[in-house]
Amino acid sequence: MWVVATAGHVDHGKSTLVRALTGMEPDRWAEERRRGMTIDLGFAWTTLPSGGTIAFVDVPGHERFVPNMLAGVGPVPAALIVVGADEGWMPQSAEHLAALHALGVSYGLLAVTRADLADPGPAVARARKEIAATSLGEVEAVAVSGATGAGLPELRAALDRLVARLPDPARDAPVRLWVDRSFTIRGSGTVVTGTLGGGRLHVGDRLELAATGEPVRVRGLHSLGVAHERVDAVARVAVNLRGVPREQIARGDALLSPGRFRRTDLLDVRLAGDPAADLPATLTLHVGSAAVPARVRPLGPDTVRLRLARPLPLLIGDRALLRDPGRHHVAGGVTVLDVDPPPLRRRGAAAARATMLAGLDGRPDLAGELRRRRLVRAGELTRMGVTVDAAPVAGDWLADPEHWHALGVRLAEEVARYGRAHPLEPGVPVEVLRQRLDLPDRALVAALLRPPLRLRAGRVTATAGDLLPDPVARAVDRVRAEYGDRPFQAPEAHRLADLGLGPREIGAAVRAGALLRLADNVVLLPGALDDAVRVLARLPQPFTLSAARQALDTTRRVAVPLLELLDRRGATRRLPDDAREVVAPPA
């Protein structure tokens, strides 16, 4: 199926032409038929000579109903521009064309109607000239009469040629179905319609309401009046939603693939149209079927920041238009450059932001986004419309390679700086490093570690950082000199204090492996454990605490915690009668 929107001035025969092509009545309401003009969106479809199906979104032409027209044009890829031969180019012809240009519609066809009432030549010439200056470029023109049927075969053939040029839809893309109608059917519940521009829908699919993020379930699908289990883009589709009240969803909302879109009310855009500096403070942003008031802040000559009255599910690269409803004026088309822009708090920040935006073209670029954001979660980029094919540095965090390398250098410097300021602490707490490097997640600190840096007990240290400060090292040397030939004698607390080994200094020496702590204020030299096992292995097995104390030539103050430590390490085994035996003598 292909979907084409009509466009043109009021009462130039758009609905009459669609009716002649399809045999269907696009004007849905009695008021529309009574007044002879389309007020809301109408839909009809037909089979082309090639056998394909084309669906028309018939939009209103009257200036009062231009927002309705934009709701129909926004999601479709091509337009059928209708101009009456008897009246020629008119104000709404120009405004509709400006809207198509602003939205970047590049496929179209010109139908000059009422060829039975006037010579179509002048209308064709003027309309093709106006259209050629827009994104549509040169278009094929067909003169036709909806009343007599003249030119209809030629128009059908031209429509076949038009749809043959349309690009293939992205059927694997996430679903973003802009809702253009919402109503209730007795026995079925809430039904919404829209143009499925990308992706595919299945009965039973779980989707999200863009307005609230609330999950909804697809109860049924209809396309062109027929029930389907699956509908692929591009298509006009009606979606029956399970358990959703009618008042909860309306035109301008959207059905979304879960987790694939970011709802944003702040975005930076490039403007093609009026100079940014000439824009009024408030305009209306039209995107998809949504029309949302937006406060405008110019940044550069053609870049602006928009603050929306309500969040919308937008992606980088989306096309939209800004319109001044008071003046019935299209200010220009916009291309979304950033859906998560940084705040502009400092003096000169807006100018710097404009300079940065000048280098963006609205095409999602992973390397560029990483360079600008430095650190970002993969899911956040996906919800912006960026394809993620890089490996995370930690969890789902992605990093700009240069920034990541610089962080590693800074991490080593911070560890060294902290070690100099706190020589007796066992490294830097991870949280301190996270704050100093301004990292959003502690897992990133661990991911940055490279030898000799290592993580131990929530702190980051390095081999160089394990070396003892000079006063502590000298005190340990004194202990080694005094007790080297008495390895199982522990200095008394007063002697440790005389040597300058208080609790913090002892802790640092123990962490560095220069002393072995058995209990509070009970320390030995680090080789004492292996030496003790060798001595105890020469005793008759099993042995008692008293025998061990005598063999080790030490006191009960040392022997008890020493044997308990050997038990915990599996070098000795304590038996039911409190005797012990050596389990694994050292080699």
Image (cartoon, grey):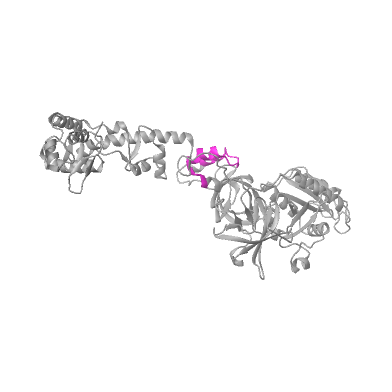
Q: Is residue 560 left or right of residue 282?
A: left
Is residue 376 part of the magenta span, yes or no?
A: yes
Question: Residue 492 appears in which quarter of the rendering?
Answer: top left
Residue 38 as seen in the image, left or right of residue 347 = right
Q: Position of residue 347 (x, y in %)?
A: 45, 43
- Horizontal side of 45 relative to 554 (left or right) equals right
Q: Nearer the viewer, residue 536 or 513?
A: 536
Q: Which residues are magenta?
A: 351-379
Q: Is residue 220 at all visible to an observer of this figure?
A: yes
Quadrant of the rendering where the C terminus is positioned: top left
Residue 419: horizontal and vertical position, in percent?
29, 35
Picture coordinates of residue 582 (x, y %)? 22, 39
Between 271 and 536, the one nearer to me in the picture: 536
Query: Is 167 contained in the magenta span?
Result: no
Q: Nearer the viewer, residue 36 or 123?
A: 36
Whole-percent x, y for residue 427 in the image: 30, 38
Decide which of 399, 483 is in the foreground and name it. 483
Image vertical order of residue 201 relative to residue 167, above or below: below
Question: Residue 537, relative to residue 303: is it above or below?
Answer: above
The residue shown at (60%, 47%) is 278
For this orientation, the residue located farthest to the bottom is: 186
